[in-house]
C-alpha cells in the first residue's frame, strides 16, 4: 500500500523503517531541507499548505497519516476529503487547542488537573489567583516538547510572563503534586480492535523527555486498567485508527491525564526492541488495515534520548544490550538527535545487576552533558516562548 | 559514515534498514531496475563493471561492502584500491571457484565431503566412479540458491548431465548422508574481535532455503565449539571484517563444511527479532569500525522464507508473535519475496505449545504452495543449469 505521511522528522523516519518490511511504500511531505525521513523514503519538500504539493501527496497515496500534529486543519481537511486520513481529523481538531483537549477529557470522564483559560491580563491574574502557586502556564496552541509552557512559582514573575506572551490565549493548570509521570500507548485497528502497551515511566527535564523506563515499576492491575480505560475512551470517541499516546500523572492510586498525542510518541521508542511489536509497526499495521501485533513487553528496557549533542558513539554502541538509533539531524542545543534503548536480558539477579550497570554507563555517556539544566529558562524570563 | 554496497537485493535492503539507525548513509550499485534497496537508500543503476559507476560509488563511499559475491574480481579489486573493501578481496577470491573454497577448508583443517574436479567427459566419468552414487555435481563458479548443482543418483543420467553442462568446469562431491543441515554466522570486527551466533538448523528444498530454526535443537557445547572454530579459522585467515556464514552438515557428533558465504545470509534473518543484535546491524557495525553487538538469542525463533508467491498477508501478519519482512519484489516461481520470523515468548510449556501452533499455521500459510516440490528438476533433465 502507498502510505503518505505529513511530517518527515524522526517519527516519520522510524515509521518508514518499520513500514518497508510490511511491504508498503512511503511518500512524505515536509517543508524542511533534508529531514530525517529523506534517507529512507521519498519526500516532497513543501509547506503543508502548498496546494500543488498536497495534490501530489494525495495522488501518491492510498492512505494518509501524520507524525506531526501541528499541520493546519485546513490542509488536513483538504487531504482527508481525497484520501483516507488516519488517525481521524477529529483527533487533530481536539488537539488544536489545549482547551478543547481538556474538554474532551472531561466529556469522557478522564480526570485532569484543575484549569482555567486567560485571554486578557485580568483573566490571567484571576486564573492564577484561583489556581494558586505553582501554576503551569501554557499557550493554548502550537506547544510541544516544553515549548510554550512554563511553571510559574513566584508572583513577582506574573507581569513579566504575561508581557512575554504578547496576548497569546493561555491555559493555566493547577500544578499537580504528582508521584511520577507515566504514559500509555494504545493502538486501534481499522476493524476497531484495540491493544495497549503497558504503562511506562517518563523522566522529563524542562518539558523534554530525557528517558523512559518500560514497563513502569510497581504498576498494579488497577492502575493499568485505569490507563487503558482512558486511552480506550479516547480511541473510541475519536474513531481513531493508529497509535495514540496519553501522558499521565500518577498521584497515589489515581491517574490524571496531562495531554494526549495523536501519533507515535517518544515515550514509545523502547517498543522497537522492548515489545513484540513496535509502536511504529503497529501504527502502520493499523492505518493500512493489517491486524495489530502483540503489544506485550519482551522484558524490561530503558530508552534514553540523545539531546543536543552526540555522545561518543563507539562507547555508546559498546554498552551491552544497547541499540543505537540516530535520526540524521545536525546537533543543536535541546534537539532530539537520537535515542538509545537498553534491554535487560532476563529477570535473574545477575541480569538485573548487569542492566543497572549498563543503565548507569549509558546515562553517563548520553545524558551527562545535560546534568546541569541547560534547557531551563533563563533567569530574566521564566517563560520560554 | 558513507557506506557503499555492491548489490542491492534484499540483503542490501536489510543492511540499509539496520544501518540507518546507526547513523550511516548508503549508496548501492546494482544493475537491475528497481532493486529491493531502491525504496530505502540511494542507488546507482549500472553494471558492476561500468567504470563511471564504480568511480561514482567510490567517490560516494568511505567504506565498501557487498551483499552479492558474484561481482567480478576485477571490479572488486579496482574498488578496493580506492576505498577500503570489507570483507576482504581474499574472501571473494576464495569464493570465486568451488575448488579454491574446498582447498581453503582443507588448509584450515575444516573437514568436507570427498570431492573431485572434472573438465572433460573422461574426468567426469572417472570422478563419478571414484566418488560413487549419489554424487553432487556443481559448476565450479557462479552457483547459489541451488543454481548450477544437482544430485546425480542414476548412472543412466550421466551422459545427459554432462551434455547439459556444455563443458563448464565441475566439482563433484561425495553425497554426505547427513543427519541435518546446520549453519553458523560469525562476525569479525575491525579490531579483530569475533562473535558467533548459535548454530541454526536449515531446511532446504531443491537447494533453496525454506526455513531456519534458531537455535538448532540438541546442540551440545562441543558441536557449537567445533562450528565456532571453523568459522573463526576462516575469519582469521581471510583477515575478514563483517558477517560470514558457514553451511555445515551434521553427521553424528561431527560437522563437515559445505560452503561459506562472505556476507550476511538467509539463514541469519531470524536474528532481526531473535537475537540481541541482528546480523545486519553487526555487519554494518563491523565494516564501519563500531564495536560488535551481542549475538546471543533472545529465545527460540523460526524463520520461514516466502518463495515464489505472496501468502495471504493479513492472515500471515495475524499469526501471534510473527514479524513480516517483504522485499518489494514481484512474484516469480522460486524467487525469495520475503520472510516471516516467528518468536517463542518463553520456555514454559504454554509458550512452547503456542509456538508450535503458530509454526504449523505459518507453514501452512506461507509454505503450503511449495508442498509439492515445484522447484525440482524436470524429469527429462536432472540437472538445472
Image: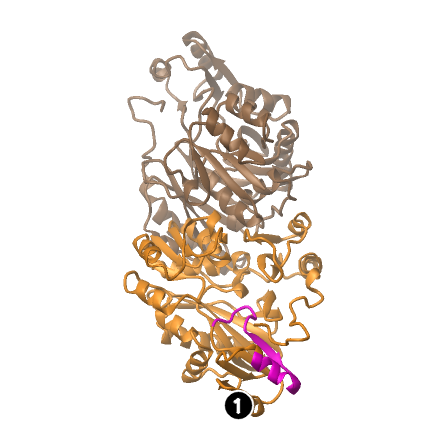
Chain colours: A orange, B brown
Along the line of sight, which residue is nearer the eye, B122 or A253?
Answer: A253
Which corner quadrant of the image does residue A154 belong to?
A: bottom right
Residue A80, x across and y down, in percent: 31, 64
Residue closer to the observer: B201 or A212: A212
- Output the chain of dot 1: A
The extreme top residue here reads B122
SS type, badge 1 = helix
**Span highlighted in magenta in the image:** A142-163
At a point 60% along the width and 46% down the height, the residue shown is: B295
Q: Position of residue B172 (x, y in %)?
A: 47, 18
Decide if residue B249 is in sight here: no
Q: Is residue A385 visible?
A: yes
Q: How many marks?
A: 1
Please name whichever residue, B93 or A7, is drawn nearer the observer in this view of the structure.
A7
- Image vertical order of residue B27 relative to residue A329, above or below: above
Q: Which residue is mark 1?
A: A122
Mark 1 burial class by Cα count in 10 Å: few <14, some 14-19, many 20+: few
Quarter that holds the C terminus of chain A: bottom right
Tell me if residue A66 is in the magenta stretch. no
**Looking at this view, is A5 or B35 the one in front?**
A5
Q: Residue at x 50, y 49 (%)?
A: B301
How far from the left and from the top, in percent, is residue B119? 45, 11
Amino acid at each position: 500500500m502507498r502510505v503518505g505521511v505529513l511530517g518527515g522528522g524522526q517519527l516519520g523516519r522510524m515509521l518508514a523503517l518499520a513500514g518497508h518490511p510490511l511491504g508498503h511504500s512511503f511518500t512524505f511531505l515536509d517543508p524542511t531541507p533534508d529531514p530525517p525521513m529523506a534517507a529512507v523514503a521519498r519526500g516532497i519538500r513543501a509547506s503543508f499548505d502548498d496546494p500543488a504539493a498536497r495534490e501530489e501527496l494525495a495522488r501518491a497515496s492510498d492512505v494518509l497519516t501524520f507524525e506531526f500534529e501541528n499541520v493546519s486543519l485546513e490542509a488536513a481537511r483538504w487531504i482527508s476529503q481525497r484520501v483516507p486520513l488516519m488517525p481521524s481529523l477529529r483527533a487533530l481538531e481536539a488537539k488544536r487547542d489545549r482547551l478543547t483537549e481538556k474538554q474532551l477529557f472531561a466529556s469522557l470522564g478522564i480526570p485532569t488537573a484543575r484549569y482555567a483559560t486567560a485571554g486578557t491580563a485580568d483573566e490571567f491574574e484571576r486564573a492564577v489567583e484561583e489556581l494558586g502557586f505553582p501554576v503551569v502556564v501554557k499557550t493554548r496552541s502550537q506547544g510541544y516538547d516544553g515549548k510554550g509552557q512554563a511553571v510559574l512559582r513566584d508572583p513577582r514573575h506574573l507581569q513579566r510572563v504575561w508581557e512575554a506572551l504578547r496576548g497569546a490565549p493561555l491555559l493555566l493548570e493547577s500544578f499537580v503534586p504528582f508521584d511520577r509521570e507515566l504514559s500509555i500507548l494504545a493502538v486501534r485497528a481499522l476493524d476497531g480492535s484495540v491493544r495497549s502497551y503497558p504503562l511506562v515511566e517518563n523522566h522529563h527535564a524542562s518539558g523534554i523527555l530525557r528517558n523512559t523506563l518500560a514497563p513502569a515499576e510497581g504498576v498494579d492491575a488497577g492502575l493499568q486498567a485505569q490507563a487503558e480505560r482512558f486511552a480506550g475512551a479516547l480511541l473510541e470517541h475519536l474513531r481513531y485508527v493508529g497509535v495514540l499516546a496519553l501522558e499521565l500523572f500518577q498521584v497515589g492510586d489515581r491517574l490524571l491525564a496531562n495531554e494526549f498525542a495523536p501519533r507515535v510518541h517518544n515515550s514509545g521508542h523502547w517498543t522497537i526492541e522492548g515489545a513484540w511489536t513496535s509502536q511504529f509497526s503497529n501504527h502502520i499495521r493499523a492505518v493500512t488495515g493489517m491486524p495489530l501485533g502483540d503489544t506485550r513487553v519482551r522484558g524490561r528496557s530503558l530508552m534514553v534520548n540523545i539531546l543536543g549533542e552526540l555522545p561518543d558513539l563507539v562507547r555508546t554502541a559498546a554498552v551491552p544490550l544497547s541499540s543505537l538509533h540516530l535520526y540524521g539531524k545536525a546537533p543543536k542545543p535541546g534537539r532530539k538527535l537520537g535515542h538509545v534503548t537498553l534491554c535487560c536480558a532476563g529477570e535473574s539477579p545477575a541480569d538485573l545487576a548487569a542492566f543497572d550497570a549498563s543503565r548507569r554507563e549509558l546515562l553517563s555517556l548520553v545524558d551527562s552533558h545535560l546534568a546541569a539544566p541547560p534547557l531551563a529558562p533563563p533567569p530574566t524570563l521564566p517563560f520560554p516562548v
